[in-house]
Image (tube, helix red, strand yellow):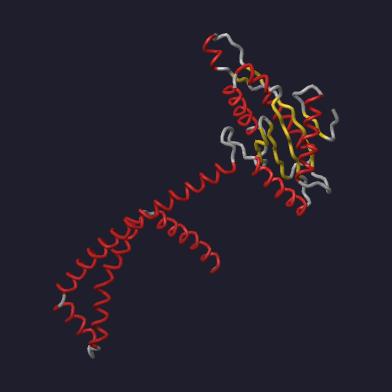
């Protein structure tokens, strides 16, 4: 019975600590000052009691409280006021420093995010993608788990750029990332490999899973319509533009490193392109 009661008390203590840490220091420090100020008269009374060392303790206590009552009230008011004011001043300085530290952490997080993501699409950068792939290969080998890689490329992207302009081409890239992001698994890592080519690192995905996700992405992109705002402004009847992607799939083999896995996925992407585009090609499903 003792152990469960301890377990019940622990969450309460943790909640109290969390509540106190969440308080602004301009509130927390004056509260601590209030507590210290309230304890000062008691400390003075105990110190006088110890120094006096009375024989009749009860008589000394009554006499001390009777003759020095005003002294203790004054000490109570003065020390509480002093400690609360000091706590507020100290808390204000601490709160400003905490705000600066929080802003600094947010800026560091933002700079880190910018360093590993593509500025246009928001997908992970080429460097981060390669680093992640190398790490996931090592982890897959240690854990004996599968790992797959998807390489995808927008079909006829140069034609889209030449026909509708580079701003529209940029929008197509953004639309692709948004569409793919809602079609992949939570643990997958989507990055921009270069130009209009993207890669998807899929930890724990066997060939069947990777092909299934790739097909889901392909279908979602093919159904996504992008409106050319410039042309639609001139002619509201302008039809939306449909883009498609070709996808190559490869699953980690014993002899693979990051370069080898990328090479095989890229070779399957090449086969998808030359097999008619808007399709998924893996080693298990020849073109």
Say whether residue 274 is left or right of residue 222: right
- Which part of the image, by quadrant, shows the C terminus? top right
Spot occupied by residue 172 in the image (x, y as percentages of width and height): 61, 25
Task: Specify the farthest residue to the bottom.
Answer: 55
Say whether residue 147 is left or right of residue 87: right
Q: Which residue is at a point 33% across and 58% down the rendered structure image?
A: 91
Spot occupied by residue 104 in the image (x, y as percentages of width and height): 45, 50
* Residue 126 lies in quadrant: top right
Q: Which of 82 and 170 is in front in this view?
A: 170
Spot occupied by residue 171 in the image (x, y as percentages of width and height): 58, 25
Say whether residue 147 is left or right of residue 177: right
Q: Which residue is at a point 78% across and 47% down the rendered structure image?
A: 257
Q: Which residue is at a point 20% across and 67% down the rendered structure image?
A: 78
Q: Which residue is at a point 59% across and 11% down the rendered structure image?
A: 238
Q: Nearer the viewer, residue 53 or 24?
A: 24
- Which part of the image, by quadrant, shows the N terminus? bottom right
Spot occupied by residue 56 in the image (x, y as percentages of width and height): 22, 88
Name above or below for residue 42 compared with residue 252.
below
């Amino acid at each position: 019975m003792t152990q469960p009661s301890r377990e019940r008390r622990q969450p309460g203590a943790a909640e109290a600590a969390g509540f106190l840490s969440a308080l602004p220091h301009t509130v927390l420090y004056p509260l601590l000052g209030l507590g210290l100020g309230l304890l000062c008269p008691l400390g003075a009374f105990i110190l006088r009691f110890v120094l006096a060392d009375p024989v009749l303790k009860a008589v000394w206590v009554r006499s001390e409280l009777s003759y020095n009552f005003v002294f203790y009230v004054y000490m109570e008011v003065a020390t509480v006021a002093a400690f609360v004011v000091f706590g507020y001043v100290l808390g204000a300085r601490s709160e400003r420093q905490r705000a600066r530290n929080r802003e600094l952490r947010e800026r560091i997080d933002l700079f880190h995010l910018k360093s590993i993501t593509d500025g246009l699409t928001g997908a992970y950068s080429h460097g981060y993608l390669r680093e992640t792939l190398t790490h996931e290969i090592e982890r897959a080998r240690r854990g004996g788990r599968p790992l797959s890689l998807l390489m995808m490329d927008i079909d006829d992207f140069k034609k889209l750029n030449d026909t509708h302009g580079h701003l529209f081409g940029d929008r197509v890239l953004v639309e692709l990332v948004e569409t793919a992001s809602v079609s992949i698994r939570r643990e997958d890592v989507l990055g921009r490999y270069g130009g209009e080519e993207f890669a998807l690192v899929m930890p724990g995905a066997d060939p069947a899973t990777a092909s299934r996700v790739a097909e889901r992405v392909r279908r979602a992109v093919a159904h996504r319509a992008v409106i050319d705002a410039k042309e639609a402004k001139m002619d509201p009847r302008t039809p939306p533009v449909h883009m498609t992607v070709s996808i190559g799939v490869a699953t980690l083999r014993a002899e693979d490193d990051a370069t080898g896995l990328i090479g095989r996925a890229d070779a399957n992407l090449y086969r998808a392109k030359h097999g008619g585009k808007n399709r998924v090609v893996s080693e298990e499903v020849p073109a």
